[in-house]
Image (cartoon, rainbow, N blue to C red):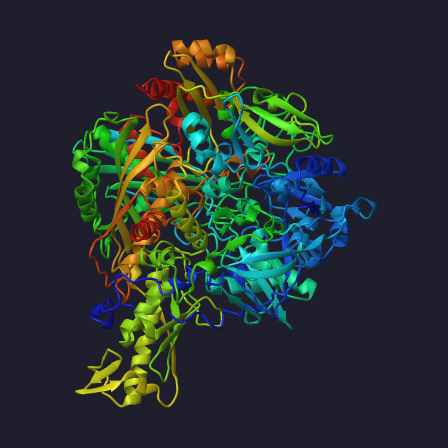
Amino acid sequence: MKFDTPAAQNPIDRLTVIGKATDRIDGPYKTTGTAPYAYDWHDPALKPAYGFVLGAGIAKGRIRSMDLSAAKAAPGVIAVVTAESAGQLGKGQYNTAPLLGGPEIAHYHQAVALVVAEGFEQARAAAALIKVDYDAAKGTFDLAAAKDSAKPAKIMKDPGDTAVGDFEAAYAKAPVRVEETYTTPDEAHAMMEPHASIASWEGDKVTLWTSNQMIDWSVGDVAKTLGMPKDKVRLISPFIGGGFGGKLFIRSDVILAALGAKAAGRPVKVALTRPLMFNNTVHRPATIQRIRIGANKDGTITAIGHESWSGNLPGGRPEAAVSQTRLLYAGANRMTATRLATLDLPEGNAMRAPGEAPGLMALEIAMDEVAERLGMDPVQLRMLNDTQVDPEKPDRPFSKRELIACLREGGERFSWSKRVATPGQVRDGRWRVGMGVAAAFRNNQLMTSGARIRLGPDGTVTVETDMTDIGTGTYTIIGQTAAEMMGVPLDKVTVRLGDSSFPVSSGSGGQWGANSSTSGVYAACMKLREAVVQKLGLPAADAVFADGEVRSGGKSVKLAQAASAGEIVVEDAIEFEGLAKKYQQSTFGAHFVEVGVDAATAEIRVRRMLAVCAAGRILNPKSARSQVIGAMTMGVGAALMEELAVDKTRGFFVNHDLAGYEVPVHADIPHQEVVFLDEVDPISSPMKAKGVGELGICGVGAAIANAVYNATGIRVRDYPITLDKLLERMPDAA
Amino acid sequence: MKHPGEFALNRRDLVAGASACTALTVMPLTARAEAPIADRAVKTPVSLTINGRRHDLELDTRTSLLDAVREHAHLTGSKKGCDHGQCGACTMIVGGRRINSCLTLAIMHQGDEITTIEGLGKPDALHPMQAAFIKHDGYQCGFCTPGQICSGVAVLDEIKAGIPSHVTADLTAASEVTASEIRERMSGNICRCGAYSNIVDAMTEVAGRRA
Amino acid sequence: MKAFTYEKPASPAEAASAAARMPDAKFIAGGTNLLDLMKLQIETPAHLVDVNGLGLDTIAATQEGGLRIGALVRNTDLAADARVRTDYGVLSRALVSGASGQLRNKATTAGNLLQRTRCPYFYDTAQPCNKRQPGSGCAAIGGVSRQLGVIGTSEACIATYPGDMAVAMRVLDATVETVDAEGAARKIPVAEFHRLPGDTPQIETALKPGELITAVTLPKPVGGTQVYRKVRDRASYAFALVSVAAIVQRDGSARVAFGGMAPRPWRVEAAEAELAKGAKPAAERIFAGAKPTHDNAFKLKLAERTLDAVLTEARG
């Protein structure tokens, strides 16, 4: 099904199942430990051996030699895989660094060997017996130092630099100007489930139970890396213990499991250890961002400029931190620039809302600074500079844009009017208290997505798609979609996900999953509805599917009857065409935060959080709300604690475990409020929905930073905002 | 939803027949005369009581309780999130207390009563805490969830038993089930999806029901 | 993790003798730090002596009116003990500010005293570390050192002792009781238990090889207002940037010890008279001669401000 004109009234609009707060249908399995994640498979026939990955001990250079003799002779060892033994390997389309290093080492903890043994303990011990002789080379690890060597870089297919009007002249003329530099650190996805795979060969075919967000991309990259046809690779990934972008692409576990299984002649299971993950896999790259905003005294922005520097391995992409600045606020004169330096740190890649998340951390502090300089309320400033069209291409309207409503609704609910604009005025016992606001913005991306639907003789509906549920609630919304479309209760729908033998879907990433994959199911269901009415000999025009029946032309027939002679199976996909060019499609929100800053120690604790979101139709308010609070939580981490600490001499992330890389714990997070504005966006898809899982993180960090400023009068522009950055300037505690 | 049946491979009962071994596993002390320990695999019989059922296993001495339960008893509900006591995904209730099963050796738990997520309830017979997690959406990806639930059950018992926490205002008074107490006590269970706010709601409901 | 043999003796003397008899033997109690380090091959014992069956898990009153805490008493039980909560509040507070509920249920009194540094370079076997591999150098000096020590450190090592419990025990003037392989018992004041690194950062305590901690004794209660304040980026489940254990008496006299600053709980008794004058003069004296790095210089200011807050709180 092509989607090239705005959606009209359709069966989804009945909203008997869609749009209802619904418990997750996979909940009973997740809460009882019976949902099988990659490392959990226990087919007694598999009898897998255990693989253990050894990471490189240098950041850059070459392996002179490896002594594998002790490891090979160790008890239980079946095989040792290295680049030398593996032979020629390709590199996946989506990988920057090779997944198995040697003799060249591209980054610290790049995999250099896999030891396969009968027992996990044996494989781990034997890996420690491998002696690697390295010839270390000098590398570049410091973004600030490499900044001047950075080169212009594109943002995917879009230009890295844009310009409208005459930014420099307008900025120079502006009566009110803010120019500041902000930095965001390297961050880790730190999903709870480590990358893990079990590989099993049958002849020239390999089956991989793994943990992956994008099944089809990854089938392709496994095939490419191993130099085999795509149809000989099967990926199975029905449950994913978090990804946040870190599992968009294949990593060393899946390739090494496949190579290990081949070498061992039997199935092999491999999980990356937690201390290996931080340097072995990918991270959100650090940025340096320079923002210049010029405004008239009435608050109208006349010039807005945003430049961003980031680093990556050769061939890697930049962090697209300027993206939102092209679209969020009006302003006749504007510029953005993207610069990319070569760094020899581990591979930088997409993490939850790549671009916007770090970009808004900077832009939305800058807006707070502009408001302060104007003596204007920061909510007001944002409303004043709203735009209903793409400011770089004014003939492109936004399909829906409810930023002002988000700010207004949020301000009321949060009692924003009680905020004392002058910083450092509010005290509650030992806490200095402040409030902050930021806009949330994230584009609505659309991906082709397919599904297969089966109608059984018993009237049950089964959906099969290679779509993944990474905690997003996809099982449930896909089930809801099929139930709504076919007029059956949710418990008559079975959803099967994450298997490359199913039709190719959008996969999960870029907050495109919910809208795209349910639209794919919608398309397949439309086809099934046609097949059903045809089978039942009913007129199609006025067919209503409800209560397990099909009603048409005054007749009412059980849905199951259509499949009485045998299961009906259809397959279709949604393909989005044209509308994205004509309309800018984005999601909007507003974050409101109250923090307390300890008057003595400058420890920062979040006291209240509210997000108001306008993101199209909300398919399942329960899981959508969870997506938003989860993103807000990750935003708290980014604002206050998360930083991969770079050893700029040795070239690696030093705090490479969950004790060193702190993410928020229960005690860091207060009760969180989320409000969804009642929005439907027929330009987005037949579901009239958009994404929301990444919107929730966009802007949170800046809202916190602005609240800290409001509490203390101290402006911190370098994330994370830790107490050491406040301490020197903190007023006396008394 | 039906259980993703074709994926749910049978957890074939690999438990060996009754073994009489309950004695302390004192290893032979003649090891020095033989090959260095590090070059040998040291295996030992270990008898674990998991969810009320005895499992007689033959384990490498290095096997953590977590790996014994997951890889040898084939109860994979408990998760390995970090293997270093830094995340809480492996939380089990042992002898009535919640612990990180990754940071203890199976061999040290001969005869202990071990409760895992599978021992609390089943999809068609949920424990009240499991039901409350579903109702309040106290999870997303689900990977930390077994640990959160085991911890959640144990935390309510700890509060009842009067064990103080960092946020207990008065050390000499009885502890109460407050949001702040739940947050502090649950802080050893990391949820990167950020379901914390919902987990507090789930636990509060269960605590209320109990009281 | 290297392979090891395992035994579980029934008496402290047996345990000490087993440890002495076997090469590269280690005691294991809670295991929460030892197994963590064994998985990374930072600790590589060839034999484990499980001391959980030694009956060292009780808390009893001493003849002097204090408490004798068995080496195997779990952190949870120690923090929850009614006598500790009433008479040694700073200890209870320190315990519950450490680690997580799960870890406190396993971690023992002796094990907590012996927990090793959290320096990230110590934890990474590809990096030089004089504590892990004597003579290999110190990557933390000149590396990432925000969490590391500012005083009592050396050219060889700037690691901190990471625990909380021992900081409280330091202000309580606790004594560590041990038994050695020959069965001889001795008492080590907690002040002398942890060693400064000097040229031998691998030697962290006063214990001799094979010597087993059997108990920690607390002198009779000293009263006063007892406070343990732990400062950290994350609200829970994190090691201290700075912590302060304080006992403040009604007459204004006080004793304080600091965590997160040094290779051992940091207390300077000679400076405690200054506490009456305020946090600043006291902190200057307590941290005289500090050698912070660029990354952790803030800890001095933080320690002073935290001390000030603690004194203000305690003096009401």
Q: Is residue C181 left or right of residue A298?
A: right
Decide: is A120 above or below C287.
below
From this view, report whether residue B146 is shown above or below residue C303.
below
Q: Is residue A170 visible?
A: no
Quick one: A446 or A507, which is closer to the camera? A507
Q: Nearer the viewer, residue A424 or B100?
A: B100
Q: Is residue A269 visible?
A: yes
Residue C279 coordinates in the image, percent (x, y): 40, 14
Query: Where the N terminus of chain A falls, by quadrant?
Result: bottom left
Question: In this view of the protein, which residue sits in the foreground, A18 or C251?
Answer: C251
Q: Quadrant of residue C192?
A: top right
Give the residue displayed 34% in from the left and 71% down from the top.
A521
* Left or right, residue A117 beside residue A630: right
Whole-percent x, y for residue C13 in the image: 69, 35
Q: Position of residue A533 (x, y in %)?
A: 27, 85
Screen quadrant of the C terminus of chain A: top left
Q: Residue furthest right?
A: B33
Q: How many marks?
A: 0
The answer to which of C32 and C91 lies nearer the viewer is C91
Taking the spot 52% from the left edge, 34% from the top edge, the residue there is A142
The x, y position of residue A543, in whole percent, is 22, 81
Q: Is residue A391 left or right of residue B78?
A: left
- Residue lying furthest front in this view? C63
